């Protein structure tokens, strides 16, 4: 469905993405993970053309991203950032409904859909529809950011560190929310995080980046059981990793840790 084909990016002749290729299938929750500055956001933005590759191409349904009508492309693509970016002067109902305006949906219908979406994330419209964004907690704002991205039923949603500013409990709730909504809607999601726990918990597939170089692409199990490089191994095995992986992947890690090769590039 989506193909990154030998993409590279340089800023003032400094390479920040180097010859990266991978495929994303329809319905994947595809996680780009790596340390800060490794190029995750740059790759994400190549999809909605906020960034253009210096070399290579990104394809969506067989067609080059650069050949899409930009407005159509952005209409088909939801975008969720760390800061939910709600319009501060619109209430929640209008913040969501405005996404449907370009589709020519009548105002009452738009408002109905906004209320349905609020209900879907346990935010009673009676209580929330008329509230302004600054009357919400960070977690509530992000909830609305997520349903707002889903409102127009986009084929692809891009999420860039959507939960980084939230405390661990709310973060986990919103991870569960995204997992649930993604299961229901089968939307393809590209999800950027620097947090390996989040990557393992969320991803159907994970791409690990370091300094603009793709280290490995695989399922969480593959990444853990067969890390392709030393970097991947250290990134996922450091810092009390084992404990959280058991929670994430239903156990079975202990043996695999010692089986993983030390002889890695
Ligand atoms: P990540 O999302 O993994 O933190 P980014 O994709 O944001 O990484 O950035 C990758 C590298 O590209 C960083 O070194 C960053 O400083 C650089 N970079 C990103 N955007 C620009 C830009 N507009 N101009 C120059 N350098 C940039």
Image (cartoon, rainbow, N blue to C red):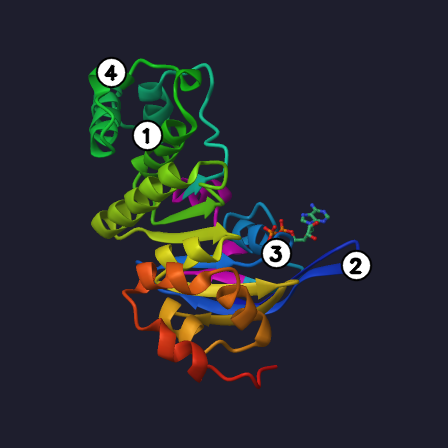
Q: Nearer the viewer, residue 248 or 59?
A: 248
In terms of image quadrants, where is residue 245?
Answer: bottom left
Q: In terms of secondary structure, where does tag 2 sit?
A: loop
Mark identifier at residue 13: 2
| Residues marked 3 and 2 touching at CB (< 8 Å) | no
In terms of image quadrants, where is residue 31?
Answer: bottom left
- Looking at the rendered image, the disc whose residue lies closer to the viewer, 3 or 2, is 3
Mark identifier at residue 127: 4
Q: Quarter holding the N terminus?
A: bottom left
Ligand 1 under 8 Å from disc 3 Cβ? yes
Ligand 1 under 8 Å from disc 4 Cβ? no
Q: In terms of secondary structure, where does tag 1 sit?
A: helix
- Looking at the rendered image, the disc whose residue lies closer to the viewer, 4 or 2, is 4
Quickly name the residue at label 1. 100
Please tell me which of labels 1 and 4 falls first in the chain. 1
Q: Is residue 204 visible?
A: yes
Cα distance between the residues tagged 3 and 4: 40 Å
Cα distance between the residues tagged 1 and 2: 41 Å
Cα distance between the residues tagged 4 and 2: 52 Å
State the extent of the magenta-drawn residues as a range: 58-77
Please tell me which of labels 1 and 2 falls first in the chain. 2
Q: Is residue 129 magenta?
A: no
Ligand 1 under 8 Å from disc 1 Cβ? no
Q: In terms of secondary structure, where does tag 3 sit?
A: loop
Mark identifier at residue 176: none
Q: Is residue 26 visible?
A: no
Q: Position of residue 54 (x, y in %)?
A: 67, 60
| In the image: residue 194, left or right of residue 182 | right
Quickly name the residue at label 3. 39
Which residue in the rendered view is the most extreme toward the right?
12
């Amino acid at each position: 469905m989506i193909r990154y084909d030998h993409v590279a990016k340089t800023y003032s002749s400094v390479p920040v993405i180097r010859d990266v290729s991978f495929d994303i299938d329809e319905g994947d929750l595809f996680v780009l993970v790596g340390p800060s500055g490794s190029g995750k956001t740059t790759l994400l933005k190549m999809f909605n053309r906020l960034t253009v590759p210096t070399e290579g191409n990104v394809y969506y349904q067989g067609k080059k991203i650069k050949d899409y009508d930009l407005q159509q492309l952005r209409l088909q693509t939801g975008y969720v950032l760390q800061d939910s970016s709600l319009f501060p002067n619109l209430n929640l109902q209008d913040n969501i409904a405005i996404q449907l305006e370009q589709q020519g949906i009548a105002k009452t219908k738009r408002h109905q859909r906004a209320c349905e979406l609020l209900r879907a994330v346990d935010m009673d419209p009676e209580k929330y529809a008329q509230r302004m964004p600054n009357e919400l907690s960070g977690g509530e704002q992000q909830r609305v950011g997520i349903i707002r991205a889903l409102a127009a039923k986009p084929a692809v949603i891009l999420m860039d560190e959507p939960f980084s500013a939230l405390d661990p409990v709310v973060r986990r709730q919103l991870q569960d929310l995204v997992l649930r909504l993604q299961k229901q809607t089968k939307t393809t999601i590209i999800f950027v995080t620097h947090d390996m726990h989040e990557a393992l918990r969320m991803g159907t597939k994970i791409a690990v980046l370091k300094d603009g170089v793709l280290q490995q692409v695989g399922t969480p199990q593959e990444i853990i059981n067969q890390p392709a490089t030393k970097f991947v191994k250290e990134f996922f095995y450091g810092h009390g990793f084992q404990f959280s992986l058991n929670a994430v992947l239903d156990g079975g890690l202990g043996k695999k840790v010692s089986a993983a090769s030390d002889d890695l590039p």
